[in-house]
Image (cartoon, rainbow, N blue to C red):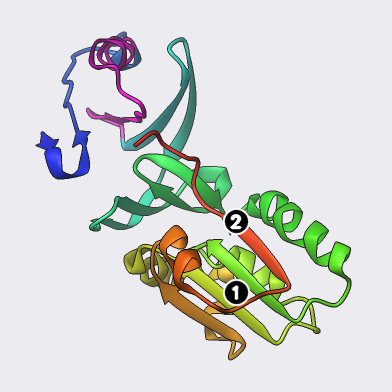
Amino acid sequence: HTWPEYGYAAVDLFACGTRARPDVGCAYLVKALQARRHSLSTVRRGRGVDMHWMDEPLTPLDIYRRNITNVLHSKRSRFQEICIAEAGAYGRALILDGQLQCASADEFLYHEALVHPAMIQLGLPRSVLILGGGDGAAVREVLRWQSVRRVTMVEIDHEVVEACREHLYDIHQGAFDDPHLGVVIDDALHFLQHTDQTWDVIISDLPDPVEG
């Protein structure tokens, strides 16, 4: 399956038996097609089997595997494939283009470290700009500061915001409904190039960069 307008292709591999190695086929295709990014999802079928595994290749020889027990939301937006699912011990997770972005069980390890050092450095920040962060976790952490009067979140994909607002309350904890928050649907770079507003703190919560 190909989507040239997104620079995206998907391949279905069907195999019989328990010794099949789809990861080997995936590694071969990645090398042959010189893919810049890739993900591998495995669905095991058969009697007594009801599991969906999400495999994230770390290297051609190493894979990180998570058990997906329930898919709550799955949709392709203009920009990316959006999935929100129950990911075993990790809880509810946001997955974009097959890459896990955050999960309710451990996202605080990332978002607390992302937000609070800069806020502490300033002391009493009143205005904060968040680039990305459609899951709402960075906003949640910013709003813990009582000195904050204005938060602007710039997210390119409104469908990510809507899906996270509906399905990831454990992560955003109602931050989207806070009156101090303003959400702007725009490309972060475009927004910065055209705004005349200023902020005390700017936080980048964007996905890993991909070569254009």
Kindly identify the residue that appears in the image at 74 percent across and 57 percent down: 112
The answer to which of 43 and 129 lies nearer the viewer is 129
The residue identified by callout 2 is: 204
Q: Is residue 30 magenta?
A: yes
Q: Residues within 10 Å of mark 1 (few under 14, many from 20)?
A: some
The segment highlighted magenta reads 24-49
Q: Is residue 66 above or below residue 177?
A: above
Q: Secondary structure at mark 1?
A: loop
Q: Secondary structure at mark 2?
A: strand
Q: Is residue 16 magenta?
A: no
The answer to which of 5 and 64 lies nearer the viewer is 5
Q: Which percent across, then down, holds residue 145?
A: 79, 77
Q: Which percent across, then down, holds residue 155?
A: 44, 65
Q: Is residue 98 above or below residue 177?
A: above
The answer to which of 142 and 194 lies nearer the viewer is 194
Sequence-wise first label, 1 or 2: 1
In the rendered image, which quarter is residue 56 located in? Answer: top left
> What is the quadrant of the N terminus in the image?
top left
